[in-house]
Image: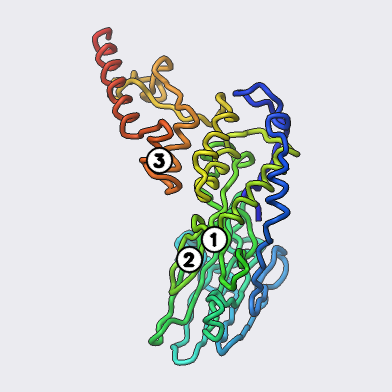
Amino acid sequence: MAFIRYLGACMVLASTGLPYAQAHAATPAEQRIITRNAQPRPVPPLATAQVQGDDLHAKAQPVDLSALGLQAAVKVADNQPCPANSLLLGKDENPTAGQTCRVATLEVNAPEHPVFIQTLGSLMAEDSGGLMDLHLSLYQLAPNGQKNALPQVVVSGYTGGAHCCQAAAIVEAAPQGQWRVLSLPAQNGGGEPIVQDITRDGTRQLVYTDERFDYAFASHAGSAMPVVLYQYQDGQLQNVTAQPRFAAYLRNQLAQDSAQWRKTGVTEVNGYLAAYVATSANIGELNAGWRYMMARYDTHSDFAETWCALDKAAWPQTRDGASCPKQFVKTVPFPQTLAQSLVQWGYMTPQQSAALGYDMDKIKQNQQQVIATTTKAWRAAH
């Protein structure tokens, strides 16, 4: 599961003037990394079934699964009131009064627990929205030491659209007859959550990508999302990506993806480099990743952030409302935008950012001083 998912055509790097493939010559060290590191072991479900696929003309099928003393079923009913709130779609359905839907409902039975019943959401049909590619699976997400524990129920569906979304949730029979329900992070595209044993030690990781990088530094097609590894325990997801035991896996991803991008080229290198630096930070090699980025980033990206050096209260009014005069629009350098985002998203600390030359507090203070000075001069002239 590579962290790069979108490829473009070859480009010339603005910062070096070299063709992309030439600026990223393959290294023997990367090939040794790819060859040496063991591949993760896929973790198959104990049982799985599809309720509805992508054929909207086909009839959705109720399913019933069982494993290790737990039973889970998805029931389907037509011509039901459309749900206003559901496990997978939340409050996004917003049904019209009197509208009816094909509705999927999850029912789970476990020893010494009351029956768990909850609506999953409406299902897509020829004339209605909702979920498609709806799956029910039973997983043993606990490590080897808990093999006899009740499995977890994983439900997932695709909400449709060009860029969105896998909606998924875990339902678990907790102690004292309670139920735990956890919504999983939304992911671009469909399919079921990916469960792997990354280090082949009997543990279970849910493999995701960080969707915050989408559109942040490049278009959707040019955005690259770094891998995020979660472990599930007691109704909670723990982000374990930066743990040292996963460094070899992430380093392997960097080597594979860099080789792939050298082969195919990119149209928006900043989208790739942002994910590269983030993954470098997760394996404890932030400085090396930052140097790699600084030598290659595009200084003329269409996705550069801007700020206005004139106080908003002084902006002149136009027919379309107040706007910053063009002469006061300042472009934020990509490294500064990246540093700010990586601090905000937890990939590095403010102190690490400052050590790289981007002290966000000082940058903000400098901007405020510039705004105060230019605004004073503007008011004096107008």
Q: Foreground: 51 or 351?
A: 351
In this rendering, which labeled residue sits more in front, label 2 or label 3?
Answer: 3
Kindly identify the residue that appears in the image at 70 percent across and 40 percent down: 261
Secondary structure of residue under mark 1: helix
Query: Is residue 105 something one can see in this rendering?
Result: no
| Residue that lies at the very extreme toward the bottom in this rendered image | 112
Identify the residue at horizontal 56%, vertical 71% (top origin): 203
Q: Quadrant of residue 307?
A: top left
Q: Is residue 276 above or below residue 156?
A: above
Residue at the image point whose x is 57% and y is 35% from the top? 292
Say which label, 1 or 3, has the lower sequence index: 1
Q: Which residue is mark 1?
A: 245
Residue 7 percent location from the top left of the image: 69, 41
Q: Looking at this view, name the residue that lies furthest to the top.
A: 381
Q: From the top left corner, tell me how far across and down residue 305 is, in percent.
A: 46, 30
In this view, the residue in front, 14 or 135, is: 14
Vertical arrangement, residue 21 with respect to residue 2, above or below:
above
Query: The disc labelled 1 sits on which kind of residue?
Result: Arg
Q: Which mark is residue 183?
A: 2
Instruction: Determine the CA span between mark 1 and mark 2.
Output: 26 Å
Q: Quadrant of the N terminus?
A: bottom right
Number of numbered discs = 3
